[in-house]
Image: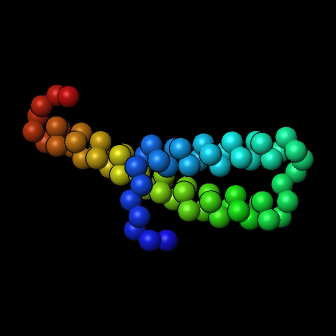
Amino acid sequence: MGNHTMSRGEMIRRLDDASREVHERLDNGPLSPDERHVLAATLTRLLPMVADSLQDQEDREAAQALLRGASGSKP
C-alpha cells in the first residue's frame, strides 16, 4: 500500500459505502466468492489506515498529557 493520506471523513465514508454495499448484497442472498474477495480487498486497504489514524490521535493525546504533566499545568 502506498503512503496515500486520507482524511478521517473519507475513511469513514468509504467504510460506510462498503458496509452499505454488503448489507444491500446480503438482502439479495449470500455474497459470492468474487464479492467476498472485493470486500476483503477493500477492508484490507481501509482498516490499516483507520487504525493508523486512531493510533496517531491516541499518541498525540498521550504526548499532550505528558507535556501537561511535565509542565505542572492542568488541562
- Where residue 24 appears, x then y in whole percent? 77, 42
**Please, is residue 1 above or below residue 44 in the view?**
below
- Where residue 39 appears, x then y in whole percent? 70, 58
**Please, is residue 73 above or below residue 7 in the view?**
above
36 horizontally vs 20: left or right: right
The residue located at (83%, 45%) in the rendering is: 26
Quadrant housing residue 58:
top left
**Way the structure is coloured:** rainbow
Q: Hey, which residue is sitting farthest top in the picture?
A: 74
The residue located at (83%, 54%) in the rendering is: 31
Q: Hey, which residue is sitting farthest right in the picture?
A: 29
Q: Which residue is nearer to you in this view: 67 or 45?
A: 45
Quadrant housing residue 46:
bottom right
3 horizontally vs 50: left or right: left
20 horizontally vs 16: left or right: right
The residue located at (49%, 49%) in the rendering is: 11
On-image quarter of the C terminus: top left
Q: Hey, which residue is sitting farthest left in the picture?
A: 71
**Please, is residue 72 above or below residue 48 in the view?**
above
Q: How many marks?
A: 0
The residue located at (53%, 44%) in the rendering is: 13
Q: Which residue is nearer to you in this view: 62 or 4?
A: 4
- Where residue 65 appears, x then y in whole percent? 24, 39
Quadrant housing residue 66:
top left
